[in-house]
Amino acid sequence: MQDRQTLIFDADDTLWENNVIFERVVADFIDWLAHPTLDPAAIRAILAEIEEANVVAHGYGSTVFLRSLRECFTHLTERPMGAAEEMRMAEFTAAFTSGRVELIPSVIDVLDELSARHDLFLMTKGAPDEQQRKIDASGLAEHFAGVDIVPTKEPATYRRVLAERALDAGRTWMIGNSPKSDIIAARAAGLRAVFIPNANTWAHEHAELDPADGGILHLQVFGELIKHF
């Protein structure tokens, strides 16, 4: 058991399931599109390129994702959506506005225990209103001494949050499922990190982690945190 530490938690796909919703919508979109010549893998590749461009231009979140679906439809069909297709898009939109979140197993019990021994914070990236809605729906806010909703997670983001909250990087850990934004970016800012993989992690967040980096703790499931902190 360590001395009191600062634990910063990612939200999407660390505390609750998120990308699986996007994956379900993508699968439904491809089935509905029923493209006459392209197979699902080819459509996914085209959509991924459109998504990547839109993330750079417009940021993260379901609104940007739905914009990418529309652009993918227009690109592949070479025409705008009609009334019936707009209705189908409304169904895709509803998948992100249900007002519910699916917590990762053991999250509440683990946060209850860790908050008695350490200082807990939440850092999530995306559209502020959308991320706040999920935080509210989760019922987890009471576990955290502070919440930061940021447009992106880069080394500079972590340095800014550390400075604003007067946190010591040497005793601060970033806990998340995304190699790029949760682990590599945090390590570049001088934090230590805990990597907890999620099978549904967004492809854009994939990256190879340095197996020789002693500042990264690799766990298999969220519940293992209480064995280390």
Image (cartoon, rainbow, N blue to C red):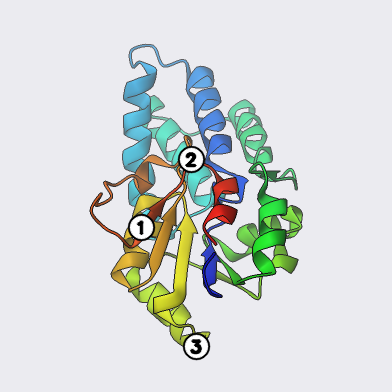
- What kind of residue is marked 3? Ala
Instruction: Write down the quadrant of residue 134 in the picture.
Output: bottom right
Depth order, front residue of 29/78: 29
Find residue 198 and name its label.
2
Q: Residues within 10 Å of mark 2 (few under 14, many from 20)?
A: some
Residue indicated by mark 1 = 216
Q: Is residue 112 left or right of residue 171?
A: right
Please tell me which residue is depicted at 56% across the width and 75% down the height of the picture. 4
Q: Quadrant of the C terminus?
A: bottom right
Q: Are marks 3 and 2 in contact (CB under 8 Å)?
A: no
Q: Are marks 1 and 3 in contact (CB under 8 Å)?
A: no
Q: Nearer the viewer, mark 1 or mark 2?
A: 1
Q: Residues within 10 Å of mark 1 (few under 14, many from 20)?
A: many
Residue 212, position in %: x, y? 23, 53
Residue depicted at 40% across the width and 78% down the height: 169
Q: Which quarter of the picture shows residue 88? A: top right
Give how far apart the Cα atoms at labels 1 and 2 are.
16 Å
**Residue 166 numbered tag:** 3
Mark 3 is surrounded, within 10 Å at the Cα level, by few (under 14), some (14 to 19) or many (20 or more) other residues, namely few
Is 188 situated above or below 164?
Answer: above
